[in-house]
Image (tube, helix red, strand yellow):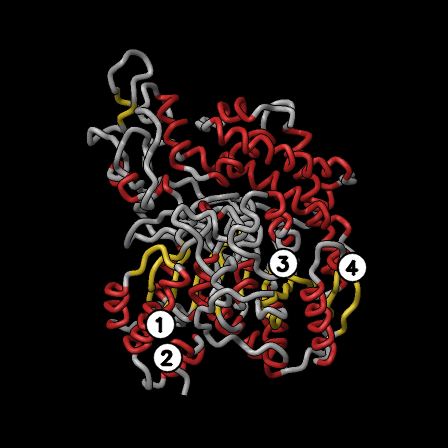
Amino acid sequence: MPELHELTAVEARAAIARAELAPAELLAGARARHDLVEPHIRAYRRVDFERAAAAAGRPRAGALAGLCLAIKDNIADVDGPTTCGSKILANYRSPYEAAVVSRVKAAGAVITGKTNLDEFAMGSSTENSAWGPSRNPFSLAHVTGGSSGGSASAVAAGSAQLALGSDTGGSIRQPAACCGVVGLKPTYGRVSRYGLVAFASSLDQIGPLARSVADAALLFGAIAGHDPRDATSARVELADYSAAAARGVRERLDGVRIGLPREYFGAGLDASVGDRVTEAAQHLERLGATVREVSLPMSRHAVAAYYVIATAEASSNLARFDGVRYGHRAGSAGAAAAWPPGSAPTGAPPSSLAELFAGSRGEGFGPEVKRRIILGTFVLSAGYYDAYYGQAQRVRAKIRAELEAVLQTVDLVLGPTMPTTAFRIGEKTADPLSMYLGDIYTTGANLAGIPALSLPGGTDRAGLPIGLQLMGRHFDEATILRVAAALEAHAYPPLTPVFPRAEVVA
Amino acid sequence: MELSVDQVARLACLTLTPAEQREMSAQLERIVAYVQQLREADVANSFDEALRGAPEPEWRADEAVQSEGARLLEHAPHTDGRFFLVPAVFGAAESRGDGDRA
């Protein structure tokens, strides 16, 4: 008999539906697990088990009835601060809740709290949180991946069954890969971004993190769908995603065509990761799928195009944090009272409006956010705009066209999620470019707007998880979930929550 | 990098310490050198290909919706209950303004 925190969401849901398990018991299991693991992994920015207990005591019918769900702290709720991992929003309380929060509540989910992230979701390791990094339960000396690292770590360690993350260039899939869980970045427009604090609006998308494909499908089905409050939300028919995952477990994959991009297997890819992708392709062939090589020559420009477009959009989106309407204000103690221990505003009180703007931002933003604002402002500045931003948009269009053309000839593209397994905390903080290069496989799906999922595909020699990425056609999350579920059922069983382990040595 | 970090920081309304400027200059120089590769990419007809078959945008009706109004003031660092307070643009006293107009 598994312990309560070991139940998958689908198992717990079935037990609750049969009245064999009460939501309050399930929550108590998550809470007990949280108390054990959280001092090690620091996955949460805020927990509220009292509020969660009240919700669990009033069971609601719905797809997520009674399930324990954590939410990334850049998705607005009205129960406490939404900090985005930033000092500038340390005491910010949203006046409204995100569409996805309303949807998971309406589906009966019990919200355990808000999870840690790279500041404003900018990063690939969760080291950029003003409150310090979350840690990988597979090895506490290693990063969780980012930016949804708290969500991935909580799910992997069993202090939440399900979690919401956001993905602008890989921020759901990379932490999923690092922490051995499933993460889905839906098609751009599939899930409402209403209430998601904007980083790069043409790339951002909210999606699920979970321990199994069926769990991810369950949560995705609960949050997907049109929302008039998000102008980019698409009115495109939904599929039965749980049925798609179930079909993958039940049926062979005859007729499914998988492409392996030749460019993905070049320099920079760890052999241990590449071998697992090759092995996954062989599993798919045994299950009846056909696998063939495809070519994505423009993919080598994805990181460059991404870091121009994403930072340009960020520099514009983050202009709203000016110390006037909300958030930290230079010379004022309000938000600073909630800052991490040991940090305090440094500047003199501003004497002009210009100093108020620049000083509030200088004190409130962390180094990576500042770096991206500077880069984004530069690539949009007169004299450079066309050479950088304009050219990046043209490259983006090419990347999109190329992926769409390949996805006319195959149903899915298989590859690694990341070139390596999780790296050590601190290993790349002084070298942002090397951190950015780790986004090589994930940024393409955001630039093209297509859905992509990371599935755990075993571990390397040190025992650190390896992520396999499946990319599909616009709005065809169902095929991704079907094939991922088949791989999971026949080759890579879902993770049992990991008790945090001290450092592993590769 | 063709532009100084100091100059771009002013454009971005962002105060940086001298140490931050030094560190960022070196890092951004490498990052900008890396993204120069975009110039090599063949981008002929790029938008034509990308926009083929793209769905028509969906327009929403032009209807007034209730704004959060006064509740938004609750989150501001300094207000007088009706307006956001900011340092004076002209003169020395703190004055009324909404930040956008100022």
Marks 4,1: beta carbons within 8 A = no
Residue A417 lies left or right of residue A33; in this view the side is right
Alpha carbon of mark 1 to alpha carbon of mark 3: how far?
A: 29 Å
Foreground pick, B75 / A235: B75
Q: Which mark, residue A262? A: 4
Q: In the figure, residue B85 lies in which quadrant? A: top left
Count of number-bearing discs: 4
Alpha carbon of mark 1 to alpha carbon of mark 2: how far?
A: 9 Å
Amino acid under label 4?
Arg
Residue at left offset 29%, top offset 39%: A335
Residue at left offset 56%, top offset 75%: A245
Residue position marked by numbered label 1 in the rendering: A33
Q: Chain of mark 1?
A: A
Disc 3, SS: loop
Residue position marked by numbered label 3 in the rendering: A418
Q: In the figure, residue A461 lies in which quadrant? A: bottom right
Q: Image height check: is A151 above or below A283?
A: above
Q: Image height check: is A205 above or below A30?
A: above
Same chain check for tags 4 and 3: yes
